[in-house]
Image (cartoon, rainbow, N blue to C red):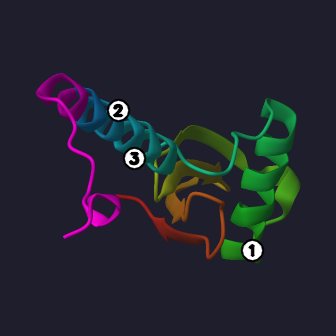
Amino acid sequence: MPHYMSKPTLSPARQGARIRFTHAGLSLLALAALSGCAPPAPAGDQTAAIRAATVAALPDIPADQLVISDFSRSAAKSTWKVSAAGKTYACDADELLRLPSCKAAG
């Protein structure tokens, strides 16, 4: 085989460096993918979004009577509690507060 068709050989040190570089690049890519795409909403916007999701899930209760507490957001789900008219509700939705659902608690 002519010399111009053969692959150049890397020294063991260069091969190790290439593997470390590839591993580091893949690690950074995985970290970026797992960190989430949507930045958290500012507190004021978040409160309004939670209230809007709650009103969508509990349309019979006036928005001014809702007391929202214990909001928590994970990578795939948001949860919170609502008190209104002497009742407590456990609510949840996806991480962007879509498809909200509230059920009477206890």
Q: Which residue is mark 1?
A: 56
Q: Mark 1 and 3 residues: CB-CB less than 8 Å, in contact?
A: no
Mark found first going from the N terminus, 2 or 1 = 2
Q: Secondary structure at mark 2?
A: helix
Task: Say the numbered circle drawn on residue 21.
Answer: 2
Q: CA distance from mark 1 to mark 3?
A: 35 Å
Q: Amino acid at mark 3?
A: Ala
Q: Amino acid at mark 2?
A: Phe
Where residue 100 sits in the image (x, y, percent)? 61, 71
Q: Amino acid at mark 1?
A: Ala
Q: Residue at x 54, y 49 (%)?
A: 80
The picture quadrant where one finds residue 45 is top right
Where residue 55 sits in the image (x, y, percent)? 77, 67
Q: Which residues are magenta?
A: 1-16
Task: Say the numbered circle drawn on residue 30.
Answer: 3
Q: Secondary structure at mark 3?
A: helix
The picture quadrant where one finds residue 87 is bottom right
Mark found first going from the N terminus, 1 or 3 = 3
Disc 3 vs disc 2: which is toward the camera?
A: 2
Disc 2 vs disc 1: which is toward the camera?
A: 2
Disc 1 vs disc 3: which is toward the camera?
A: 3
Height in image: 80 above or below 70?
below
Task: Say the numbered circle drawn on residue 12.
Answer: none
Q: Secondary structure at mark 1?
A: helix
- Give neighbour class at mark 3: few <14, some 14-19, many 20+ (Cα, 10 Å): few
